[in-house]
Image (cartoon, coloured by chain):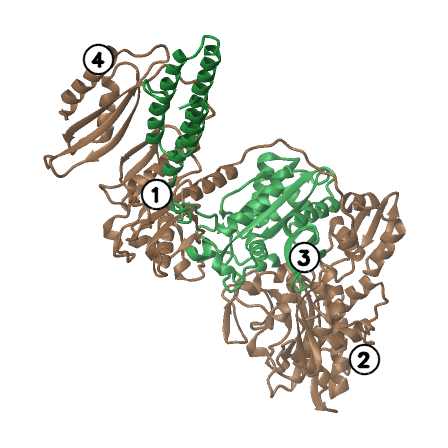
Chain colours: A green, B brown
């Protein structure tokens, strides 16, 4: 066999290779002690001295070509075998993940967090207080004396010892002023209780209130805070109106309405106002030097708007089908 | 309060559409609750705030509307008249400022001159006031018109003179609806010489009221101070049109004007003998209040500057007159119908109302800067998210439940009951979150759930201190025969314990320990109490089987409850780099008496191996086949290491033999 024929055979053999066994055979066939290349190189002794170097060089190149072919064949075979073994590992990626384990926060918690996140970022501290309150903190300190008609607006649950379940989160404002003094900027989320139950009222519900006290706080600051908040919660396109209202602990007092985008009706969403000087004085500060604003809203009502909820009571059935939505 | 739309239009002397009228009124703080139809007319239902007693009439509403619209307001006043005779009874005011003005007139020989006017009947009907007697209808109509509640007595039932006084001990009064009120010494009454004949400003006594056969009438029109009326009707569980108005404040200059209007209407409809009006006032009769204010006060509170002219003219529209001005201080006089105006902030609100709240500008500066603090609230929310990630759904339950539920579970001791619960099922504040979670479980089981992981963060209440405790409770119920397609893990005590251990890691709660439970709610041999140092912070386990029947469950649930408001949390600790030397591990398989706890084994190993012990991990517990009934087999992997060197085979062997001999000696363990 001459050189060229061997070269052609080699190319052909290696191009058809597909397994390690075949490769092993080819290795012996070409590079073994009795392989083609060794056999061919024996012919050198038949050549003239002049031709020998060239032939030797050609044999060397042929050996190199063979080694190169072995190397690339080896790579090819390994690639094939990895591919085969990967195919054996195939799984059904459409099966659901192992044990499903993610719970959910209650919609009221989600709503509260949205609100507290906003006010935290505005520098408000978050405060809470007891749910069992005294008459003093729930009413008197908030400028609601015993015979005040405003107590009619609060259907209060009383305990035997004369204490009560707080009817609003406002007592926390008083406790925070007593604890921290002024300037002050707090937000107080929490449970409140009123003896009321129908489609829009539950005997326990949640409120969140804000209070800012400092020198020179005015109605313009209050409006700005509320408007920025409504932009955040309901979107900057939301139509808002402020209208006069009455709370014993604020003067002037306002109710804030937003326009329902679907029904085009005004929806009452929160009350607010400048803190009544009596409240500031009773909490131990001086209303001649300090002023403030306060605002408060029902979290259920906010949740109702954010989730487009129909019946408020479904928030308290704790039906897992409802909660896992 | 319901008022006819057509009547309001007359009073304001213009014809806005009902929607525009209601929108304007809303924007000055007079909220409209709804609009109804009546005989081709509309009725507007107003939801008045407690401060605006002055708006409790057609006159009051029209007055405020015209002020806002800057329109001239006119409401007809009746001329004076000459009565046929004197009012014969004496009137004595004995209750100081509670009643400082009282007018009365007597009427007799009523004969119809014409048909009773339809407009009066319609107004009463619109307002939901029953037609009783023509004279009563007239005084009620005048009340709707002008805001002055009055009362008609049967003159012949009154013994002698009239006195306004506080009730005497043990006096009673029977009012409409057959209620017999036991009066107390702070109840203001109208009395004759024998007994109370009316609960002043609230309700007349039934024994002295007019009937169909009444021939001679006395009409009372008085000024009762709000402080004398406030809360009284509510105390007896009712309210009346009169009490609503008087406790908010009725114009103290109105009583005679209203009475004259009653007489005019009466004489228009009837031939009647009408006496002179008799009015008695005492020294407590109120004077109009004065309020001082400066332009700077207004700027400070509203954030806008207004001119002197604007201030004076705006308040004038509301009948608030400038009395005098000294330097920068303006002194204004409050009209007799505005009981809600007493400090300068009240005037500032009036100015804001007239400007319109929506026209006040926003101010974008932040008035307060204060130091940031992490609150307990952030911790609670982090726990909630943690529980979510452990697969638990958050629930929120009422804080109160049926006392019986607590009694059934033997946890009613020191519980707090409401004095006035909505109903029995919401009568008592919960002492534990367990009953609520158990109720949630039952609710969901009835709706086909077999697998449930719930948690709640809420307060529990006790008569003992502290009265309120903020708790985290979780419930785990797993009765699902078909597990997930590739998981067969049993959710049990150890699952919950693992969650609490993870919670401790996540929130750096140090020094937790677990002891056999003393919590009667839980299975005594399969539950634990959890301590932080020496303080009990909660328990974990399965519900005691004896309660299973009481809450109707086929299978016990697992549950834990932790007090989270006083947990001790470690600060961030120093971090050290891990050793570059390899660690060594050995696995041990032991057989020990069943009664020996893992804790005992762990302690024994820790005290036996003197050096290099890094960790031990239990990876198998087995009892049953091939093992003595009284024994269990335990497999533990122990790891040793040093940050100074690689441990030699000899050192490991030495530690191993120390451990084995310790286990054999102290716990009679047999190495397998």
Q: Which is nearer the eye, B641 or A61?
A: A61
In three-dimensional space, the C-alpha distance between marks 2 and 1, rounded to whole angstroms, equals 84 Å
| Picture quadrant of residue A269 | bottom right
Q: Are marks 1 and 4 on the same chain?
A: yes
Residue beneath label 1, please? Answer: B560
Q: Which mark is residue A258?
A: 3
Q: Would you say B600 lies left or right of B485 here?
A: left
Residue A45's place in the image compared with B290, above or below, is above
In three-dimensional space, the C-alpha distance between marks 4 and 2, rounded to whole angstroms, equals 124 Å
The first of marks 4 and 2 along the sequence is 2
- Residue A272 visible in the picture: yes
Q: Which mark is residue B82?
A: 2
Nearest to the eye among marks 1 and 4: give it: 4
Q: Position of residue A217 (x, y in %)?
A: 72, 41
Q: Would you say A168 lies left or right of B588 here?
A: right
- Residue B106 visible in the picture: no
C-beta proximity under 8 Å, tags 2 and 1: no
Residues packed near mark 1 inside 10 Å, few (<14), some (14 to 19) or many (20 plus): many
Mark 4 residue element: helix
Q: Are marks 4 and 3 on the same chain?
A: no
In three-dimensional space, the C-alpha distance between marks 1 and 3, rounded to whole angstroms, equals 43 Å
Q: Position of residue B38 (x, y in %)?
A: 67, 80
Residues packed near mark 4 inside 10 Å, few (<14), some (14 to 19) or many (20 plus): some
Mark 2 residue element: loop
């Amino acid at each position: 066999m001459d050189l060229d024929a061997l070269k052609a055979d080699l190319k052909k053999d290696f191009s058809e290779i597909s397994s390690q066994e075949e490769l092993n055979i080819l290795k012996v066939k070409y590079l073994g002690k009795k392989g083609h290349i060794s056999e061919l190189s024996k012919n050198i002794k038949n050549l003239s001295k002049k031709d020998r170097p060239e032939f030797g060089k050609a044999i060397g190149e042929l050996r190199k070509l063979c080694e190169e072919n072995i190397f690339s064949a080896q790579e090819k075979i390994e690639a094939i075998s990895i591919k085969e073994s990967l195919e054996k590992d195939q799984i059904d990626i459409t099966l659901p993940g192992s044990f499903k384990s993610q719970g959910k926060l209650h919609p009221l918690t989600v709503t509260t967090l949205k609100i507290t996140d906003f006010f935290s970022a505005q520098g408000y501290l978050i405060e809470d207080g007891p749910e069992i309150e005294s008459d003093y903190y729930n009413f008197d300190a908030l400028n609601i004396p015993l015979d005040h008609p405003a107590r009619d607006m609060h259907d209060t649950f009383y305990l035997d010892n004369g204490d009560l379940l707080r009817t609003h989160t406002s007592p926390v404002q008083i406790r925070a002023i007593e604890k921290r003094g002024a300037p002050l900027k707090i937000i107080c989320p929490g449970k409140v209780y009123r003896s009321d139950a129908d489609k829009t009222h539950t005997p326990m519900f949640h409120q969140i209130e804000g209070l800012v006290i400092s020198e020179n706080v005015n109605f313009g600051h209050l409006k700005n805070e509320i408007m920025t908040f409504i932009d955040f919660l309901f979107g900057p396109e939301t139509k808002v109106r402020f209208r006069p209202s009455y709370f014993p602990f604020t003067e002037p007092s306002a109710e804030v309405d937003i326009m329902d985008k679907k029904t085009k009706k005004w929806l009452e969403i929160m009350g607010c106002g400048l803190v009544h000087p009596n409240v500031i004085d009773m909490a131990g500060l001086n209303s001649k030097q300090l002023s403030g604003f306060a605002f408060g809203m029902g979290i259920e009502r906010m949740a109702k708007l954010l989730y487009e909820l129909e019946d408020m009571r479904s928030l308290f059935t704790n039906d897992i089908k409802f909660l896992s939505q | 309060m319901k008022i006819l739309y057509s009547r309001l239009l007359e009073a304001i002397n213009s014809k806005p559409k009902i929607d525009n009228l209601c929108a304007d009124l809303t924007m000055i703080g007079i909220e409209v609750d709804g609009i109804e139809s009546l005989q081709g007319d509309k009725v507007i239902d107003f939801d008045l705030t407690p401060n605006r007693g002055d708006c409790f009439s057609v006159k009051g509403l029209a007055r405020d509307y015209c002020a806002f619209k800057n329109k001239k307001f006119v409401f007809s006043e009746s001329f004076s008249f000459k009565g046929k005779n004197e009012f014969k009874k004496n009137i004595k005011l004995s209750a100081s400022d509670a009643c400082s003005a009282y007018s009365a007139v007597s009427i007799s020989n009523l004969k119809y001159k014409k048909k009773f006017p339809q407009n009066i009947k319609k107004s009463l009907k619109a307002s939901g006031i029953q037609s009783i007697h023509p004279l009563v209808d007239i005084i009620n109509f005048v009340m709707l018109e002008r805001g002055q509640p009055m009362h008609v007595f049967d003159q012949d039932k009154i013994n002698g003179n009239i006195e306004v006084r506080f009730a005497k001990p043990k006096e009673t009064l029977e009012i409409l609806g057959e209620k017999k009120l036991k009066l107390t010494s702070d109840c203001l009454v109208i009395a004759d010489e024998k007994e109370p004949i009316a609960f002043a400003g609230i309700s007349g006594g039934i024994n002295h009221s007019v009937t169909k056969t009444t021939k001679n009438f006395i009409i009372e029109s008085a000024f009762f101070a709000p402080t004398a009326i406030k809360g009284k009707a509510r105390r007896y569980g009712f309210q009346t049109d009169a009490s609503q108005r008087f406790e908010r404040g009725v114009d103290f200059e109105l009583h005679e004007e209203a009475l004259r209007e009653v007489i005019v209407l009466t004489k228009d409809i009837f031939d009647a003998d009408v006496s002179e009006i008799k009015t008695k006032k005492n020294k407590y009769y109120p004077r109009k209040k004065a309020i001082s204010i400066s332009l700077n006060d207004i700027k400070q509170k509203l954030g806008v500057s207004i001119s002197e002219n604007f201030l004076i003219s705006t308040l004038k529209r509301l009948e608030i007159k400038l009395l005098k001005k000294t330097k920068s201080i303006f002194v204004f006089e409050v009209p007799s119908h505005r009981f809600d105006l007493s400090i300068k902030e009240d005037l500032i609100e009036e100015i804001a109302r007239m400007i319109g709240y929506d026209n006040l500008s926003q101010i974008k500066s932040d008035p307060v800067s204060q130091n940031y603090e992490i609150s307990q609230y952030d911790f609670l929310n982090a726990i909630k998210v943690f529980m979510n990630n452990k697969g638990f759904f958050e629930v929120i339950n009422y804080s109160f439940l049926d006392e019986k539920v607590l009694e059934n579970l033997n946890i009613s001791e020191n519980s707090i009951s409401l004095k006035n619960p909505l109903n029995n099922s919401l009568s008592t504040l919960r002492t534990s979150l367990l009953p609520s979670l158990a109720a949630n479980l039952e609710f969901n089981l009835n709706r086909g759930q077999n697998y449930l992981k719930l948690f709640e963060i809420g307060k529990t209440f006790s008569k003992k201190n502290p009265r309120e405790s903020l708790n985290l409770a979780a419930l785990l119920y797993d009765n699902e025969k078909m597990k997930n397609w590739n998981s067969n893990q049993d959710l049990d005590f150890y699952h919950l314990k693992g969650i609490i251990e993870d919670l401790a890691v996540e929130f750096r709660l140090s020094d937790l320990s677990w002891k056999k439970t003393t919590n009667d709610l839980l299975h005594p041999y399969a539950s634990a109490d959890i301590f932080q140092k020496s303080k009990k912070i909660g328990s974990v386990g399965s519900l005691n089987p004896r309660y299973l029947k009481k809450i109707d469950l086929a299978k016990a649930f697992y549950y834990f409850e932790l007090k989270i408001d006083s947990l001790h949390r470690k600060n961030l600790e120093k971090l050290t780099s891990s050793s570059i030397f390899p660690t060594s591990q050995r696995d041990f398989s032991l057989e020990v008496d069943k009664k020996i706890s893992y804790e005992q084994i762990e302690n024994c190993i820790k005290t036996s191996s003197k050096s290099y012990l890094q960790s031990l991990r239990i990876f198998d517990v087995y009892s049953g086949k091939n093992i003595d009934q009284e024994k269990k087999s335990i497999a533990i992997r122990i790891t040793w290491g040093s940050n100074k060197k690689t441990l030699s085979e000899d050192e490991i062997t030495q530690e191993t033999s120390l451990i084995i001999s310790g286990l054999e000696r102290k716990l009679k363990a047999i190495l397998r």
